[in-house]
Image (cartoon, grey):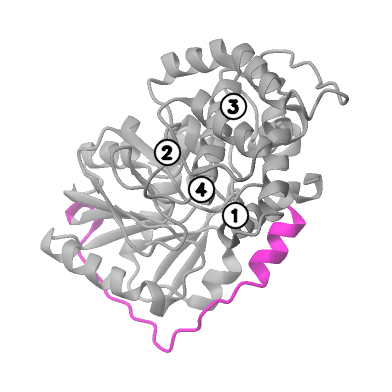
Amino acid sequence: MLISLVREHTEQMNPPRALWVPFDLGRPMGAPDEPDFQRRVLESGLSLLAEKSGPVLADFPDDAPGSKPEDMSGWVCPVNLAPADADEAESCLRAQLEQEMTALQPWYDLQLEQKGRTTVGVGADNIRDSAKLIAGFLEDPSIDSPCDYRPLALMLKYNAEDLKAWYFEAATAQPGGSGRELADWFWKATTAGKSLLQLASTMRACDNKGLQALGTKGIVPRAYEHLVP
Amino acid sequence: MGSLDAQHLREKEVPDFETEPFVEGPPLAERRLAVITTAGLHRRSDKNFSLEDIGYRVLPGDIDLSDIVMSHTSVNYDRTGFQQDVNVVFPLDRLRELQAAGEIGSLAHYHYSLMGAGWLPHEIEPTCVELAGYLKEDGVNAVLLVPV
């Protein structure tokens, strides 16, 4: 039984049993911390196993909780992040990033305590090392990979994902933000977002094809591509 | 979904299949179910998914969900739901509840994770054939396929 996020693709491939769900990519069960809703999605899909003939493509009828425009909570970041001074931005990115992360650290710690888990850690054991690697590359794109068996491009990618995850986990200590609200905040209002936009731009300008490729497709979402300098 | 993402999905190469296999099975309350996710999930101690990785990672049935991380290469989907609650991508807690309530017969010893990133069927087929063998050995007769 397949959960389908893109109905047009499923219509063309005709798997035996599929349940199309009207949810955002990345949220096949609808919404986090909504166990009753998640259970309903599962029960709807698994009920298709009883069908006697197919292919069957059913539609889940309900939107995910909190996904409609009128559900938007007006989420705000738990701390007031001062806008970067444009004159100092380039030379002080590392310091600004450090300052921003220090401000967010209590919220990350709180979220970790509440959830008892983190998804950070695919790039480095310490998030400050992730930030230092990215800032270091922006200062000198000829640095070596910090890992003996993984190329620099891949390490930048993993550490960029860690940085995003760390920020989103800190931000969700203040509940209620939709995926879009959180992404807008990260890419438009944080020094970390600005750093990753600059990272993508710098990777694309390198001669190394791996850096070019990941800088083009692996750092900044399509929806925020227009912000890349 | 934004217009750029929708356009990208519309332009994706989607295969046509010549056959439409369909089999019946026992009631759900007698089935043994495994999850296959394409979200690039794995245990923290596992090797990350790399850029062109057609391999799989094993997610044991008794896994502590707080041990799961994600190293999918795509940046074009929301991860904030997963970061708050792994069940929004890999609903093992919900499946455990359904099993405890008797709605599902049993859950597999092992679930599997791949990284769906535009692989065409012939590219990922050897991995899927291998997994099918493991699922049969595990007595699985229902699979929940979850994209991201």
Q: Quick one: label 1, few (<14), some, or many (20+) residues within 10 Å?
A: many
User: Residue placed at 41% from the left, 55% from the top?
Assistant: A45
Distance between mark 3 and mark 4 Cα atoms: 22 Å
Q: What residue type is labelled 1?
A: Leu
Residue at 42 percent of width and 14 percent of height: A113
Check disc 2 and give the amino acid type. Answer: Val
Question: Which quadrant of the structure image shows residue A40?
Answer: top left
Where are the magenta residues, as a range? B1-30
Quote the CA–CA distance across marks 3 and 1.
Answer: 24 Å
Provide residue B110's location: percent of width, then percent of height.
20, 50
Q: Residue B16: within the magenta?
A: yes
Instruction: Say whether marks 1 and 4 touch (CB < 8 Å).
Output: yes
Q: Position of residue A26 (x, y in %)?
A: 54, 47
Crowding at label 3, few (<14), some or many (≥20) Cα neighbours within 10 Å?
A: many
x%, y% of residue A126?
44, 25
- Answer with left or right where residue A182 lies relative to residue B128: right
Compared to residue B104, the image places residue B143 above or below, namely: below
Q: Distance between the residues labelled 1 and 2?
A: 18 Å
**Residue tagged by mark 3?**
A167
Viewer-closest of B81 and B28: B81
Q: How far apart are marks 1 and 4 (CA)?
A: 8 Å
Residue annotated with mark 1: A211
List the residue tagged with mark 2.
A122
Badge 2 or badge 4: first in the primary sequence: 2
Same chain letter for marks 1 and 4 = yes
